[in-house]
Image: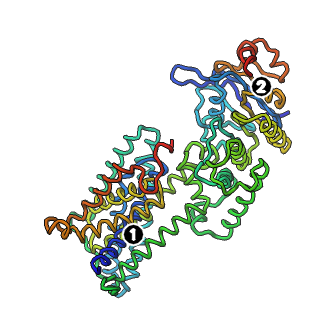
Amino acid sequence: MDIFLQQLINGLVLGSIYALVALGYTMVYGILELINFAHGEVTMIGAMVALSVIGLLLGAMPELPGILVVLAGVLVAIPACMLLGYAIEKIAYRPLRKAPRLAPLITAIGVSIILQNVAMLVWGRQYVSFPRILPEGRHEIWGAHITDLQIFIVVLSLSVMASLWLLVQRTRLGRAMRATAQSKEVAALMGVNVDKVISATFLIGSAIAAIAGVMVSAYYGLAHYYMGFLLGLKAFSAAVLGGIGNIAGAMLGGMLLGMIEALGAGYIGDLTGGFLGSHYQDVFAFFVLILVLVFRPSGLLGERVASRA
Amino acid sequence: MADLLEVTGVTKQFGGLAALEAVTLSVGKGEIYGLIGPNGAGKTTLFNCMTGLYSVTAGRILLDGAPVHNRKPHEIVRRGFARTFQNIRLFANMTALENVMVGGHIRSRAGILGAILRNPRTRAEEAQLRRKASELMEFVGLRGKGRTLAGHLAYGDQRRLEIARALATEPKLLALDEPVAGMNPAERRQMSDLFRRLRDSGITLLLIEHDVKLVMGLCDRVAVLDYGRKIAEGGPESVQQDRAVIEAYLGVDEGTG
């Protein structure tokens, strides 16, 4: 029971992060029907920028409280990622808006590779470690442990998701985004500036990615120029699981995927008699992706793709 | 009467095919102007050129004296040109009221920061947008249906909602693409009344319609398109008696229309 609970907690934390990254995939897909493969790299850049700022601050003012240092890192990473996301859309995707769908997809993969290599040049091939400056309290509940950081990640992630939900459902921009997602053409004919809405979508998605990037590097204690690749693929799987294009779906899919992965990692050893160990945890995301694509391609909350036309 | 819309020599080619050939027409302020013609005559193509969905190959379109051809759709809407669609194109997954509110965006200001910070001005503007949208819903006869998903409304109500949404952009000129298609005679009469009320409130109407009787009863002037050319223009009676028109359209349609 305590292993189950423990893995559930771990899954919740992991899922919170996946959900945030998945939101970026799903919002862009919802509006452009483009899988923005560079989104994982935006997350990675967020982590790297934050770590650089944290490193600088620690060097300059070592007496500063850890939380403030990390907060400063996040506050720099967010605009940096927003700028990056905005530029990616403007430079790499906008000129291809009317091109066949395969063209921007290939461009997205290209952007992703470019960003990885730029990050490698800037931050090196080594793992960059996240300094241990955050509070490390541990709490016990029914035999399982949860750390301050874990609680913080889940709470922050839930509040980001709630804010996004309110933004999309209750505000003028959100309405314009939903209208644009249903039909760019009609939205434009009703006076919505579609280019602005698309830019705003990338700005918001990238800001959330920056937060997720800092979370994931704080959680694992490190960052790496290649980290965006696997994280991005998993978040994409989560978005597909929830129904790509559907914002609530991305939140649900992210959470579920995190739990599936954590529980899978916790029990795979027992299930296979020790033949496979917990390092196979990455398999689960893609196993789920395959199952969803085979049995319910529209995802848990998604509508039939055909009905969107 | 000053002309609100001036279309001069508009040509639209798709590859080698000319969908519109040197179409010239002008719509005066406060008119109800009908655009008729057989299927494939280029009526909707002309609408699409006017509203910025298509670029024009040649010619110019002036709205209130300012060129609107080859501009972006949202800029043309801002200048006061709104439209509805032949095949209803609502935001089906949004509520009826939200559909109308989207139309009102162009006349409100709040940017992305306002949306996130929700300052008092943004809230006031949002409330104003909502109030205006409800009024428009009531005006077109959709009172009490604001919370219904647009896709769940009855067919006639969807047509009305499209009009309310277009009105929310506060147009000087409202272009209606077959607004009574698929409606029964009683509904058609209601819609005619609605169009007259719109005209009386100061909005100029440009109407594509197949229902010749409705067009003739409602419109001040009519233009007839056939194979992308304007073959006649004038008052309903004179157009009805025009030989070219009878051959191209009315004559063929007499038995079925």
Q: Residue at x 27, y 61 (%)?
A: A284
In the shown orientation, is residue A163 left or right of residue A84? right
- Residue A147: image location, x then y, percent: 33, 82
Q: Is residue B183 visible?
A: yes
Element at label 1: helix
Name the one closer to the observer, A9 or A195.
A9
Label 1 resides on the chain identified as A
Q: Residue at x 25, y 74 (%)?
A: A129
For disc 2, the marked residue is B212
Q: Residue at x 35, y 88 (%)?
A: A63
For disc 1, the marked residue is A16
Using the numbered discs, state the Cα–Cα distance from disc 2 to disc 1 in whole angstroms: 60 Å
- Rate crowding at label 2 as few (under 14), some (14 to 19) or many (20 or more) other CA atoms within 10 Å: some
User: Quarter of the image holding residue B56?
Assistant: top right
- Residue A164: image location, x then y, percent: 51, 65
Name the one closer to the observer, A196 or A276.
A276
